[in-house]
Image (cartoon, grey):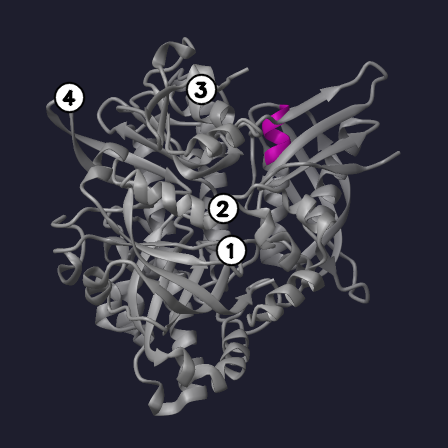
Amino acid sequence: MISKKDFKKISPWLWEIPKDFRADMRVPARVYLSEKMLEEAFRDRSIEQLINVATLPGIQRYALAMPDMHEGYSSPIGGVAAIDTKEGIISPGMQGYDINCGVRILTSEWKENDLKAYLEKLANEIHKEVPSGLGRGRQLKFSIPELDKILEGGVPYLAKQGFGEKEDIESCEAGGKLPWADASAVSTHAKNRGRDQVGTLGSGNHFLEIQKVAEIFNEKVAKVFGLFKDQIVIMVHCGSRGLGHQVCSDYLREFIPLMINKYKIKVPDREFACVPFNSPEGKRALAASGAAANYAWANRQMITHFVRKAWKNVLGDRGGKLSLLYDVAHNIIKIEKYNIEGKEKEVAVHRKGATRAFPPGHPEIPQKYREVGQPVIIPGSMGTASYVLVGTKEAEEAFYSTSHGAGRTMSRHAAVRSLSGREVVQDLRRRGIIVKCYSFRGIAEEAPLAYKNIDQVIEVVHNAKLSKKVAKLLPLAVIKGE
Amino acid sequence: MKKFEILEHKADLKIKVFGKTKRELFENAMIGMLKAGKYQKNPKSQISKLKTKIKSLDLPSLLVDFLSEILYLVETKKLVFEKVEFEKFSDKEIEAILIGKELKRMGVHIKGVTYHELNIHQKRNGEWEATILFDI
């Protein structure tokens, strides 16, 4: 059993399990947690799962876990592995099934007091306009050639078709389009699943919220991001839906026999199924992962289009613009360069439930934000606070990665047992939050008490300098798919 | 005999499935997955039948691949399956007819059938058991 004594304290926010803890570890494992959160982490198997990540061929520096870490499958959620593209592997399971599950924020020109009278109507209209994609609401169906263009063209393609603006493109991580995407690496099965799910929210922890800026921590950066106190903003959280899930399943299925028989790679869990990054099969997996990531960005873009429509339906021309502040990915494989042991190395950063957070001056962030750093969006659980932060140069030691949410502490099953959806909705309403959903069960599963306290997670993120606080957002209306 | 039970897991969906035979285990895994995921049928709809063929590396992979294929068919053919008639069944290959009704709605969108700590085994009394984790 792993216990606190196996950890070396690097700082009050960073703990390390040395490489010699288990014979198959290739690098140490590091967790960004407060002492109290570390003690709580032993309640599930997330640390053991992180040690498994440390065994992956080609992993550089450390296997990392962010402050919202919790038990997953293969890697813990909140896991980051930077893998040498020359010597290492690519692992679809280390990215997860919901490829490019992520979050974006749209900023409005409105203040809370002015919008109050329209809030209920807006929430209803958004609920009506944005389909869940689980059997209710609007259906859009694309042909396979159109879908291929989305897979390779991402947000820029949709914007060109009239579903977005030029500024939406530059305000997405990677410009909403990964260049290594290749639609021919995506199976027909995956494409069939994706044809009618562009612009759908999905289920589980995916949601859309109308929020207000409750507190500003850094006036200068907030101004650059276009944020001000009491401002109304809209947050969208969803991923690549059935298409991304199928891509991950397809490559896991293909890689298990390849890993065992052809490449003779040993991993502690089949879910890590991998092949050499530079092998023909590895290159195809990257191309497919990129295509699924583009699909997810396109999905959030289409939802943005529907939200803008709902906004206009309710507020008319007075509504003004809904501008995209930024869009970040949570589950993704990205090619980045780092100085490792004095040499520049190209690595495939596998982030599973972690957000990229580039520092000021980084060439991959939009010109308008370059001086201050990349906007980082960390959503809380449904009905609790969310945060906007900014990337730091200190996060280089974490391959410029940060948290992606609050992190669960209670199973969905336990949450449903201990609270009814009706009670959760009533509690949210008492706090003045409007809730629009199809099922009370879905609400109970996502009850705030099932998650870590977001404020504590953000304190660790901020103190460990993984990113710095800019603004705190509070929900006014929650809209859920199912 | 109980077909399946839901086990505790912090973030995802874990089920334990039972069967007197391997075939029954596979059928109950399908039923357990769709029931636990709250996939609802339109009870008044017509019965539909679909044929499926799957080849895999070994028995654990066959179970995952079978369930992944079910998820694909549920989503694209809009059907909820309730019964399986196996025409061929070995540790590496299945040919089967899936029988079900029209999908009304999904409660949870199951994202993936994972291989994580997948356990499928025969007990001393000859019955079969499997534990499966789904990403939701």
Q: Mark 3 highlights which residue?
A: A267
- Depicted A432 relative to depicted B18: above or below: below
A62 within the magenta span: no
Marks 2/4 in contact by CB < 8 Å: the verdict is no
Look at label 1 and name its amino acid: Arg
Measured as percent of width and height from the top left, residue A440 is found at: 68, 62
Residue at figure coordinates x 44%, y 15% from the top left? A6
- Depicted A408 relative to depicted A33: above or below: below
Residue at figure coordinates x 14%, y 48% from the top left? A362
- Mark carried by residue A341: 4
Location of residue A327 by image quarter:
bottom left
Graded by Cα atoms within 10 Å as few (under 14), some (14 to 19) or many (20 or more), the crowding at tag 4 reads few
Measured as percent of width and height from the top left, residue A125 is found at: 51, 80
Q: Mark 2 highlights which residue?
A: A246
Marks 3/1 in contact by CB < 8 Å: the verdict is no
Q: Do tags 2 and 1 sit on the same chain? A: yes
Marks 4/1 in contact by CB < 8 Å: the verdict is no
Graded by Cα atoms within 10 Å as few (under 14), some (14 to 19) or many (20 or more), the crowding at tag 3 reads some
- Mark carried by residue A193: 1
First reached walking from the N terminus: tag 2 or tag 1: 1
Graded by Cα atoms within 10 Å as few (under 14), some (14 to 19) or many (20 or more), the crowding at tag 1 reads many
Query: A63 left or right of A278?
Result: right
Question: CA separation, marks 2 and 3?
Answer: 22 Å
Residue at figure coordinates x 70%, y 62% from the top left? A423
Question: CA separation, marks 4 and 3?
Answer: 25 Å
Which quadrant would the C terminus of chain A be assigned to in this image?
Answer: bottom right
Part of the protein shown in magenta: B59-64
Look at label 2 and name its amino acid: Gln
